[in-house]
Amino acid sequence: MKVQVLYFAWLRERIGQGRETVETEAHSVADLIEELRAREERYALAFSDMSAVRCAVDQTLVPLEAPLGDAREVAFFPPMTGG
Amino acid sequence: MRVVVAPEDFDLGAEAARLEDGPEIGAVVTFTGRVRNVGGTLRHMTIEHYPGMTERALTRIAEEAADRWPLTGIVVLHRHGELAPGARIMMVATASRHREAAFQAASFLMDYLKSRAPFWKKEVTEDGAEWVAATEADEAALNSWMD
């Protein structure tokens, strides 16, 4: 399936783009991360410290082990620092 | 309930005055966050957000505050983009018949905004640029509302 993958803050900077369409067979967010990591060094670098990565599936925060289901949009970003 | 995510500055007084709607409202609490010039070397702060998710997430948390406390009004405003030292970043305001609900709801909203709303701050100083790290204290503050 095709998923829009979004990156924010330093994840965006390390990966070098804010969004891309990814063709994936991943069943969970963690699977998707593994697929991305295996692609290129920049993904491996961005996802090197998973304690500093948060995820939203279709704009809802989820744990990294969450199922992907028929997600249309998956976003990765560091812990939020608003306010 | 008023939730706005925009680059523009806002009028603190006018926003607070919106909540003074009727004689039964006894308390309006406002909080404003500003760009702090740590060490005097800050050039500007850049705030990135997740368009679409941000508005949804803020609306949801404002609704949760309205469920938890007897509020008569809620304002949540957050700016994004490049902000100069001293600029206003965001505000929350709450109104209620009594001050306790207004204070608690404002505090709850702030704790949420700190570590659950999809905003990221980058400080650009004379020495370079750095993303502001989240703190465990922010996370602990939010968890204290989950009991």
Image (cartoon, coloured by chain):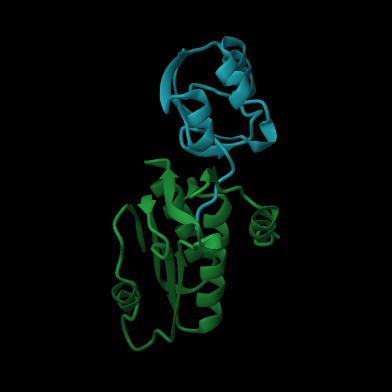
Chain colours: A cyan, B green
* In this rendering, position of residue B9 left or right of residue B59: left
Residue B37 vertical position relative to residue B21 in the rendered view, above or below? above
For this orientation, the residue located farthest to the bottom is B23
For this orientation, the residue located farthest to the front is B126
Which residue is painted at 56% across and 64% down in the image?
Answer: B108
Image location of residue A74, percent across then percent down: 49, 28
Q: Name the residue nearer the viewer: A60 or B80.
A: B80
Image location of residue B118, percent across then percent down: 49, 45
Image location of residue B115, percent across then percent down: 58, 51
Residue A64 vertical position relative to residue A33 in the rendered view, above or below? below
Q: Name the residue nearer the viewer: B114 or A24.
A: B114
Residue B16 vertical position relative to residue A9 in the rendered view, above or below? below
Q: Is residue A40 something that shows in the picture?
A: yes
* In this rendering, position of residue B35 left or right of residue A68: left
* In this rendering, position of residue A67 left or right of residue B5: right
Which residue is painted at 53% across and 47% down in the image?
Answer: B127
Q: The C terminus of chain B appears in which quarter of the rendering?
A: bottom right
Which residue is painted at 50% across and 53% down in the image?
Answer: A82
Q: Is residue A75 something that shows in the picture?
A: no
Q: The N terminus of chain B appears in which quarter of the rendering?
A: bottom left
Residue B121 vertical position relative to residue B33 in the rendered view, above or below? above
Image location of residue B43, percent across then percent down: 43, 54
